[in-house]
Image: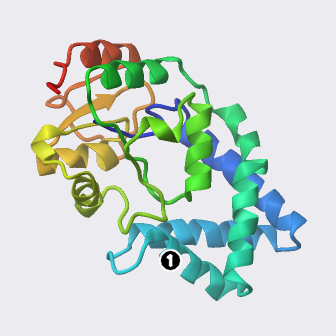
Amino acid sequence: VLFDLDGTLLPMDLDLFTGAYLREVARKGTSLGWEAERLVETVMAGFAAMTQNDGSLTNEEVFWSLFLETFGGDKKEHIREFDNFYRQEFKRVAKVVEPTPLAAEYVRVLKAKGYKLVLATNPVFPKTATFERLRWAGLAETDFTLITTYENSRYTKPSLQYYQEILAAIGAAPENCLMIGNDVQEDLVAAQLGMAVFLVTDDLINRHETDISKFRRGDRRELLEFLRGLPPLSI
């Protein structure tokens, strides 16, 4: 079972989260003596570059290649500063998210039935940032067989290759997988590979007003009932 994180396991308004995140990035830049606006623009450009990754590099390599073009300096030192940021100042962004105890219940129910879990979050963040958001959701990295981050991924959502990369990593066939997410364009694309999908409607993102009537969907409480109804896997 593949889970999206932001807006699925971790309830949030994506615009509020993005705004709070970029404000903290700007503040960090100022504290380091960097031009805050330039840093924010570079981080956003790095995210955009990762979405265009052709698979020849990891997303991490794509991001830092662009970052160093703008800021230069020592890559290891920059990475250390960013990791410190995600362990410290980034915590302030947690005030705009609204964790739900249902997230831990999903994990408990599925593990009891013998399912492998994948955190299929768009891999534009390093693991430090992703693990931090997992903690906000009341979960741990040990809950998942695989967590996609910019270190271990060469594609991003909504690329089909992103999902194919996951399938290859866990050795699973798409028809044996379920993708759960709240973003029509980024998460439902998994259905094109033959995965079952469940669209969480609480924090629904549907940029193009796509018809979702043919897809299984419901709010977080309905998702829990659906997961409780899944058959246990034979050991």
User: Looking at the image, can residue 191 be seen?
Assistant: yes
Classed neighbour count for the residue bearing mark 1: other residues with Cα under 10 Å, few (<14), some (14–19), many (≥20) = some
Answer left or right for 216 relative to 43: left
Q: x%, y% of residue 59? A: 45, 70
Answer left or right for 35 relative to 101: right
76 shown above or below 221: below
Secondary structure state at the residue bearing disc 1: helix
- Residue 184 or residue 115, whichever sits in front: 115
- Residue 115 or residue 94, whichever sits in front: 115
Instruction: Give the residue pinned by disc 1.
Output: 61
Q: Name the residue: 31% across, 24% down.
A: 110
Q: Name the image quarter holding residue 114.
A: top left
User: Looking at the image, can residue 6 be seen?
Assistant: no
Answer left or right for 54 relative to 39: left
Q: x%, y% of residue 195? A: 16, 42
Q: Name the image quarter holding residue 138.
A: top right
Q: x%, y% of residue 105? A: 43, 18
Q: Name the residue: 29% across, 36% down.
A: 116
Answer left or right for 129 relative to 173: right
Name the amino acid type tagged 1: Glu
Q: Name the residue: 60% across, 35% down.
A: 135
Image quadrant where one finds the N terminus:
top left
Image quadrant where one finds the C terminus:
top left
Q: Name the image quarter holding residue 78.
A: bottom right
111 shown above or below 169: above
Q: How is the image coloured?
A: rainbow
Furthest toward the front, the residue is 235
